[in-house]
């Protein structure tokens, strides 16, 4: 084995160890973030309930305000929602709705994503 092969192998082992260490750290951080998000969601639900019941639009706090607001959000577009909308549009013409729905689903852009993931044995 030549010196460059040994260097390459050593560098590979070093990179794998570094990747595993970073992966472990990220998992720990994500766990902590999830716990904090869950706690924040609970407190947010309580605040929303109090602010709505007492008709409070905003709280002045250090560095800004907490503002109660409502927004309308559209549901995500999935195959079931799309097919129901097409059936309505084509006035219950199942064949036409199915053809258009299939065409739309089949012509969606596909992307190839390369990644490295860890599999526990």
Image (cartoon, rainbow, N blue to C red):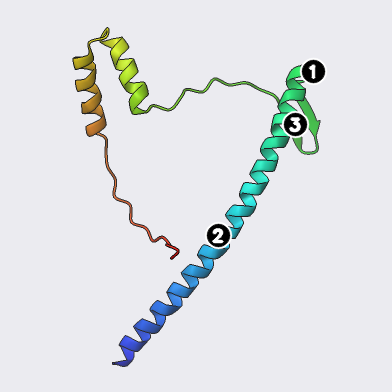
Residue at x 34% of width, y 17% of height: 84
Q: Residues within 10 Å of mark 3 (few under 14, many from 20)?
A: few
Residue at 76% x, 18% y: name it: 53
Q: Give the SS element for disc 1.
A: loop
Circle 1 residues within 10 Å: few <14, some 14–19, many ≥20? few
Q: What's the distance in space between the residues labelled 3 and 2, CA to CA?
A: 32 Å
- Can you see residue 66? no
Task: Please tell me how many numbered marks the rendered image carries.
Answer: 3
Q: Quadrant of residue 12?
A: bottom left
The answer to whether residue 43 shows anywhere in this view is yes
Residue 94 image label = none
* 18 is higher (above) or lower (below) than 104: below
> From the image, which quarter does the N terminus lie in?
bottom left
- Residue at 37% x, 58% y is 115
Crowd tier of the residue under label 2, counting other residues whose Cα lies within 10 Å: few below 14, some 14–19, many 20 or above: few
Which mark is on residue 65? 3
Up/down of 91 relative to 32, above or below = above
Q: Which residue is mark 2?
A: 26
Q: Which residue is mark 1?
A: 54
Residue 54's x, y, as percent? 79, 18
**Labels 3 and 1: the sequence-earlier one:** 1
In this view of the protein, which residue sits in the foreground, 35 or 54?
35
- Dividing the picture into quarters, in which one does residue 26 lie? bottom right
Screen quadrant of the C terminus: bottom left
Q: Nearer the viewer, residue 33 or 62?
A: 33
Q: Residue at x 74, y 29 (%)?
A: 47
């Amino acid at each position: 084995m030549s010196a460059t092969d040994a260097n390459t192998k050593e560098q590979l082992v070093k990179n794998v160890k570094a990747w595993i260490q970073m992966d472990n750290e990220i998992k720990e951080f994500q766990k902590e973030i999830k716990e904090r998000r869950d706690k924040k969601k609970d407190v947010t639900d309580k605040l929303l309930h109090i602010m709505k019941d007492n008709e409070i639009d905003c709280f002045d706090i250090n560095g800004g305000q907490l503002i109660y607001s409502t927004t309308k959000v559209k549901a995500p577009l999935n195959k079931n929602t799309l097919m129901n909308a097409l059936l309505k549009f084509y006035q219950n013409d199942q064949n036409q709705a199915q053809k258009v729905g299939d065409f739309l689903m089949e012509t969606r852009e596909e992307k190839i994503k390369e990644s490295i993931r860890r599999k526990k044995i």
